[in-house]
C-alpha cells in the first residue's frame, strides 16, 4: 500500500493597524512553542516588495538584509526565526512579490501556461501555494507558520494575493489564522480603544478570512472588557485572545504567550495532543538577559548606514548588535553601544564613509583597542595596514579607486563555483563558504576553544559571505612580511578569509571576509563575539 501523505498544518500570522507591530517576533514565538511541543516547524516570511530579494535595498530604507546559509538576502524577521528556533532558514522560507511575478512571467515566456490568459488570480496565487507546499515537503514540517508582511488593507494591496492563497489553501488543508493587532491607549482618555483593530479584522473578513486567534499588542495588558468586545463582535473564542503588551525583552514573548496557554489552545484547534513545552533553556536565557550585570563593555560600531534624515537608526546593523549582545551575555556583561556614523555628509554606497572607517581602524590598531572587522571591515583593515605600516600610501580598493597603484582589494573574473550573477555587471560571493584556519593563530585558537570547527581534523570552519570584491593575492607576501597575519584561507587557497595581528603586537585584532554575526544565536553565541567581548573587558581593566 502507498504510504499516506503527511498532514501539514498551516498557521498564517497577519498584522493590523500599524506596521512594525511585532508579527515577526509573534510568528517566531509560535514556531518556538510548537517546536518545543515536539513538532517540526517551517517558518515562512511573505513580503509585498517587487524586489526579488532584500540585497539591493539600501539598509537605511529597510534595515539589515538577513544573510542566510544558502545565500538568500532576506528580511530581518528571518533572523528572528533563526535566533528563536536555532535552525537555518533560506530560500524556501522567504518570498517576495518580485520573485512571484518573475517566476510566473518566466513560465509564461516558456509557454508553460499553454496560451492561457495569465493573471494574478489564479496564477500568482497558485505559485504562492506551490511554494508553501514545497517548503513543507522539503522541511518535513508538521506546521508551516507563515508571516504575512505588511498590514491588512494597506494602500498597495499587494498582500491581498497572499490572503487569497491562504483562503484557498484553507478549503483543503488544516489552516488557522492568527491576527496581531494594536490597541492604543490614548493618553487623554486612559482607556484602551479597539476601533482601529476592528477595522483590520473587518477587512480580513471581507477577504473571506475569519481569525482563530487574536494577539493584542498594547502599552499595557488587554483587559477582560476588551476581550469580551472582540469575542462578541467577531465570534472569537475569548480563550483564543491573548495579550502581548510591551515587555522588557522580546525573548520574554514566547514565555508570556505560553503562560496564557497559546500553544495548547492552538494544538486543540488542530485536534492534536499537547504537553508542557520545555522552555527551560529559554527561561534561563531570559533570566540572564534581564539580570543586572556587574560588568560593562563599551563597544563602538563604526558604520555608514546609521543616518536617515535627522535620525540615527540602528536597524541596518541589527544582526551585528544582537551578536555582540550574545557575546556580552556569555561573559555576564552589559553592552554600552556607541554608534558612530563614519560619514554624515555623503549618501549612497561604495566609497561613502570609507575615510572615517579607515581612521577608526588606524586608531584601534595603534592604541591596541580590541577590533573585529567584518567583510568590508576586513578589506579596509588590509588597506589601512598597507598604507600605514607597509608603506603603500595610495593603497585602496578597486571599488573606490579603480586607478589606484596598489589595489589591495579587487574584483576577480566570474566563476560559477564561487559567485552568482546578481545583475548586469554585478557578481557576488553569496552563501556559506569553507575556510582553513592556520594553526596557532588567535582565530584558530578561538574556534578550537569553542569547538566551532565544521571539520576539526582539517581545521575547516564555515561562515556566510555577501560581497563582490576580494583580497588581491599579489599582496599576500608583502603584507605578511610587514607583520600582517593571514590566518584563514579558502581550501583551494584562492581567497583570504581571515587576517589578524600577532598577540605580541595587538591583544585582539581580527577581521574576516565573512559575516559571523548572522550565525550567532542567543543559545549559541558565535565564538568570535564571545572572545571579542572578553578582550574588550580586559582592555577596559
Image (cartoon, rainbow, N blue to C red):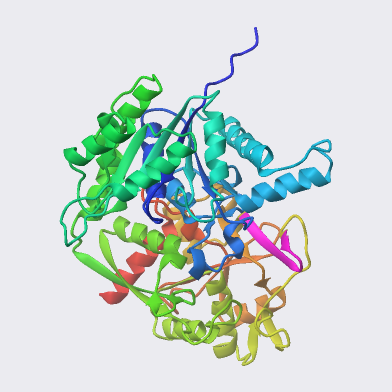
Task: Indicate the quadrant where residue 482 lies.
Answer: bottom right
Q: Main secondary structure of the magenta part?
A: strand
Q: Residue 195 placed where, x, y %?
A: 30, 48
In which quadrant is the C terminus drawn? bottom left
Instruction: Specify whether 131 is left or right of 405.
Output: left
Residue extending farthest to the top is: 1
Q: Is residue 429 magenta?
A: yes
Q: Is residue 93 visible?
A: no
Q: Front-most of 295 and 112?
A: 112
Q: Is residue 345 above or below residue 1?
A: below
Q: Is residue 240 magenta?
A: no
Q: In the rendered image, which quarter contains the N terminus?
A: top right
Dividing the picture into quadrants, the one containing residue 472 is bottom right
- With 49 as the anchor, is 202 left or right in this view? left
Residue drawn where x is 49% and y is 50% of the image: 149
Q: In the rendered image of this protein, does residue 529 appear above or below residue 473? A: above
- Residue stretch rendered in magenta on the structure: 421-431
Q: Is residue 397 visible?
A: yes
- Left or right relative to 116: residue 170: left
Task: Name the residue at 74% across, 42% down.
Answer: 118
Position of residue 68 measured from the top left corner of the image (x, y, whole percent): 55, 52
User: Residue 505 falls in which quadrant of the image?
Assistant: bottom left
Circle count: 0
Q: Residue 123, how many percent across, how many down?
A: 69, 39
Question: Can you give x and y, in whole percent of width and height, for residue 17 in the image?
Answer: 37, 52
What residue lies at 25% left-to-right and 68% top-to-bottom? Answer: 296
Left or right of 519 in this view: 370: left
Whether residue 324 is situated above or below residue 105 in the rendered picture: below
**Residue drawn at x 60%, y 33% as measured from the top left:** 138
Amino acid at each position: 500500500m502507498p504510504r499516506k501523505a503527511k498532514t501539514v498544518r498551516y498557521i498564517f500570522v497577519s498584522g493590523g493597524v500599524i506596521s512594525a507591530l511585532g508579527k515577526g517576533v509573534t510568528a517566531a514565538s509560535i514556531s518556538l512553542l510548537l517546536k518545543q511541543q515536539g513538532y517540526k516547524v517551517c517558518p515562512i516570511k511573505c513580503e509585498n516588495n517587487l524586489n526579488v530579494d532584500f540585497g539591493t535595498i539600501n539598509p537605511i530604507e529597510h534595515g539589515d538584509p538577513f544573510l542566510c546559509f544558502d545565500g538568500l538576502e532576506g528580511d530581518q524577521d528571518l533572523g528572528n526565526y533563526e535566533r528563536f528556533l536555532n535552525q537555518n532558514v533560506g530560500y524556501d522560507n522567504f518570498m517576495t512579490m518580485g520573485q512571484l511575478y518573475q517566476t510566473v512571467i518566466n513560465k509564461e515566456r516558456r509557454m508553460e501556461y499553454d496560451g492561457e490568459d495569465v493573471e494574478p488570480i489564479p496564477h500568482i496565487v497558485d505559485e504562492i501555494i506551490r511554494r508553501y507546499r514545497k517548503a513543507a515537503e522539503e522541511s518535513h514540517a508538521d506546521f508551516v507558520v507563515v508571516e504575512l508582511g505588511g498590514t491588512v488593507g494597506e494602500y498597495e494591496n499587494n498582500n491581498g494575493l497572499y490572503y487569497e492563497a491562504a483562503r484557498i489553501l484553507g478549503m483543503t488543508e488544516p489552516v488557522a489564522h492568527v491576527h496581531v493587532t494594536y490597541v492604543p491607549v490614548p493618553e487623554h482618555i486612559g482607556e484602551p480603544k479597539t476601533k482601529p483593530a476592528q477595522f483590520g479584522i473587518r477587512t480580513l473578513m471581507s477577504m473571506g478570512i475569519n481569525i482563530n486567534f487574536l494577539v493584542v499588542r498594547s502599552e499595557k495588558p488587554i483587559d477582560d472588557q476588551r476581550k469580551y468586545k472582540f469575542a462578541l463582535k467577531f465570534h472569537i473564542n475569548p480563550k483564543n485572545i491573548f495579550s502581548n503588551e510591551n515587555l522588557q525583552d522580546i525573548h520574554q514573548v514566547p514565555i508570556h504567550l505560553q503562560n496564557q496557554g497559546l500553544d495548547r489552545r492552538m494544538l486543540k484547534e488542530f485536534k492534536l495532543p499537547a504537553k508542557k513545552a520545555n522552555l527551560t533553556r529559554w527561561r534561563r536565557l531570559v533570566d540572564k538577559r534581564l539580570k543586572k550585570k556587574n560588568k560593562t563593555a563599551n563597544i563602538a560600531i563604526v558604520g555608514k548606514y546609521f543616518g536617515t534624515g535627522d535620525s540615527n537608526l540602528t536597524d541596518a546593523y541589527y544582526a551585528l548588535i544582537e551578536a555582540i549582545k550574545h557575546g556580552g551575555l556569555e561573559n555576564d556583561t552589559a553592552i554600552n553601544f556607541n554608534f558612530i556614523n563614519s560619514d554624515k555628509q555623503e549618501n549612497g554606497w561604495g566609497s561613502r564613509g570609507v575615510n572615517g572607517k579607515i581612521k577608526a581602524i588606524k586608531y584601534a590598531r595603534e592604541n591596541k583597542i580590541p577590533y573585529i572587522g567584518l567583510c568590508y571591515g576586513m578589506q579596509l583593515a588590509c588597506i589601512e595596514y598597507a598604507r600605514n605600516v607597509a608603506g603603500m600610501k595610495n593603497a585602496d580598493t578597486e571599488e573606490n579607486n579603480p586607478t589606484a597603484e596598489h589595489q589591495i582589494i579587487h574584483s576577480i573574473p566570474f566563476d560559477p563555483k564561487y559567485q552568482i550573477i546578481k545583475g548586469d555587471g554585478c557578481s557576488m560571493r553569496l552563501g556559506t563558504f569553507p575556510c582553513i584556519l592556520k594553526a596557532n593563530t588567535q582565530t584558530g585558537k578561538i574556534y578550537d576553544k569553542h569547538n566551532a570547527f565544521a571539520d576539526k581534523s582539517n581545521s575547516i570552519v564555515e561562515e556566510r559571505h555577501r560581497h563582490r570584491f576580494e583580497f588581491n593575492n599579489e599582496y599576500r607576501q608583502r603584507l605578511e612580511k610587514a607583520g600582517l597575519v593571514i590566518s584563514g584561507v579558502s581550501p583551494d587557497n584562492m581567497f583570504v578569509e581571515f587576517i589578524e595581528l600577532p598577540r605580541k603586537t595587538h591583544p585582539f585584532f581580527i577581521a574576516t571576509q565573512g559575516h559571523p554575526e548572522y550565525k550567532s544565536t542567543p543559545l549559541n553565541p558565535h565564538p568570535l563575539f564571545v572572545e571579542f567581548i572578553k578582550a574588550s573587558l580586559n582592555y577596559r581593566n
